[in-house]
Structures are given as C-alpha cells and as structure tokens.
Image (tube, rainbow, N blue to C red):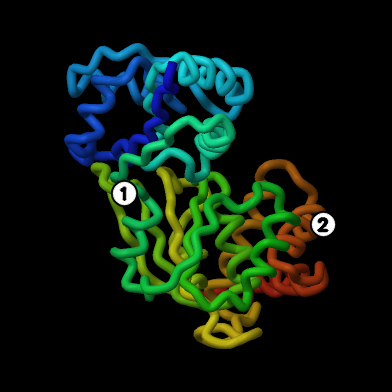
Amino acid sequence: MSAGTLYLCATPIGNLEDITIRVLRILKEVNLIAAEDTRRTRKLLSYYDIHTPLTSFHRHNYRKKGVYILNLLLEGQSVALVSDAGLPGIADPGEEMVLLAVAHDIPVVPVPGPNAALAALVASGLPAKYFCFEGFLPSKARARQERLRQLQTEGRTLIFYEAPHRLPETLADMLVFFKNRKIVVARELTKLHEEIWRGTIVQAVTYFDPVKTRGEFTLVVAGSTEPDSTVFGTVKISEPAVEKNILGQVRQLEDKGLAKQEAIRQVARQYNLSRREVYALVIQAKNGRKVEK
C-alpha cells in the first residue's frame, strides 16, 4: 500500500476571501484536516461549505497527535495540515509534522497562500531584496534581549511576530539594541482594523500604548547599515519620547502595587540602564522638570 500525502495548506490570515482555489479543492478531497485551532478552522470550512473530518494539532498535543496522523498517512490516507492562520510550519508545530513525514518517506506537498511576514514586508517600504525572518522572540526578557543583541549587526531587513501583551517590552528592548532604526508595525493584516504604521523605534515606543494595544502584530525592522552601528544614530535617555515611556512604565508598575524602588529596578533592567539613571529621571519629573509629549 502506498502512503498518503501530507498537504501543507495556507489559510487566510484574516480575510476569508484570501484562499486559493487549489486549497479549497484539497480541503474537500483529503481524508482529514489537522488544524492548529479547530474553532477558527470550522468557521472557514463552514464559510466554504466543506465537511471534511477535522482534528486538532497544536503545540500541546503535537507529539501524540503527530503519531496518529503519521499512522493514517502510512495507511494511505491523505491529510491537510492547516495552521491558526497563514502557511503551516512557520511559528507552529507543523514543522515537527513535516519532519516526521519526511523521515517515513511520506510525500509532503506545499500549497501556498497568505503569509503575514511577507505581506508586511512587501507593504513596509523597507528593503525586501534581502530579509531575515525571526518569528516570535523569546518570551523571557533575558533570552529576548540576548537574541536582539545577536541581531544588532544583521544587515538584512528583520521580520518578527509579536503578541500584543509583549509588544511594549519588545519595542523597549529593540530601542536598546537597535537604537532609532526605521520600523514598520503591521497590525491585524487583511482584517477590518488593519493598520500599517511606519516610523522609528522611538516613535513606536510612544505610539503603541501598553494598555490599549490589541491585535496580531508583525514587526519589520531596518537592518544595520554597518557593523556595530545604527541607521539613525544613538538614542539617549534624554530624548523626550524615551523619557515619557520610562516614566510611564514606572508609574504603571507602581499602580499595580510595586514599591517605587522595585518598579525602577524592573524598568532599568528592561532598558539596559542603571537604576541610578532611572531614579534620577523619576526624581527630576517629581520636582517639576517637564517631560515633553
């Protein structure tokens, strides 16, 4: 018996009309659809009147479910793998399923379509000839900062995914390691509230409010023009936009119940500054020195 085929089907990243005729045909013809988010995929299948059996395949069950899918493929059945949105295998466990299939000589067929990283890149206005896709940065501050430090001299345009609740921290870390480069922040691509924001990292730190920020984000950052340098020079703590953001984050932590010294310590670590520098800024603001908006 010949093995079945694993199809990697790209699905819409927002607008349900962004799907190819080929993907729709395959989703109807396969024996099973393995979806990262079955609730989201059911909406898509319902919209196009597709009734193929559906199973979950996500980061919490991919090891066990991967074996189940592999056995179906070895029996000759065909499976379509779809992610939460976009092309499976990028920033999701689809990569592990592909490795498993390849190890057992099972045909793997990519069926291209929407992709948030490339959509953001081509609309960014930043160089698209050479680029580096980083996906999601580490969630822990120290690991994230170390990765950004490693990317400081990368000359290609950089593309990142980020969750809304981590966006302010990521932008603050980028300010430390990338200084004031150009950045494009694409939010909710292809959806009703799509926004493509262009500016510098300093401006982005101020623009994206830590409390009100919502949606799915793709960040496109200009590469380094030369080793150990930045595109627009050095950002100093005295710059109004940076001052405002530092003071705002100290106040937010205090509002959550942290003591002033602990709030200062956390913000200083986030910006790679000394506690003395942040404390001095807080005292200056308390004594009436105006921080420009």
* Other-residue count near label 2 (Cα within 10 Å), few / some / many at <14 / 14–19 / ≥20: some
Residue occupying image coordinates x 42% and y 45%: 216
Mark 2 and mark 1 in contact? Answer it, CB < 8 Å. no
Tell me: residue 6, above or below residue 180. above
Quarter of the image for residue 110 reads top left
Give coordinates of residue 215: x percent, y percent: 41, 43
**Distance (Cα) linking label 2 and label 1:** 40 Å
Q: Is residue 124 left or right of residue 16?
A: right
Give the position of the N terminus as an image quadrant: top left
Q: Residue furthest front?
A: 1
Q: Is residue 293 visible?
A: no
Give coordinates of residue 170: x percent, y percent: 59, 58
Give coordinates of residue 211: x percent, y percent: 51, 46
Give the amino acid type for the residue marked by disc 2 in the picture: Gln
Give coordinates of residue 134: x percent, y percent: 54, 57
Residue occupying image coordinates x 75% and y 56%: 142
Tell me: residue 222, above or below residue 103. below
Give the amino acid type for the residue marked by disc 1 in the picture: Leu
Tell me: residue 228, above or below residue 70. below
Residue occupying image coordinates x 67% and y 61%: 147
Tell me: residue 27, above or below residue 122. above
Residue 211's label in the rendered image is none
Point out the tag, 2 or 1, that comes first from the N-terminus.
1
Residue that label 1 marks = 189
Residue occupying image coordinates x 54% and y 80%: 224
Residue that label 2 marks = 261
Callout 1 secondary element: loop
* Other-residue count near label 1 (Cα within 10 Å), few / some / many at <14 / 14–19 / ≥20: many
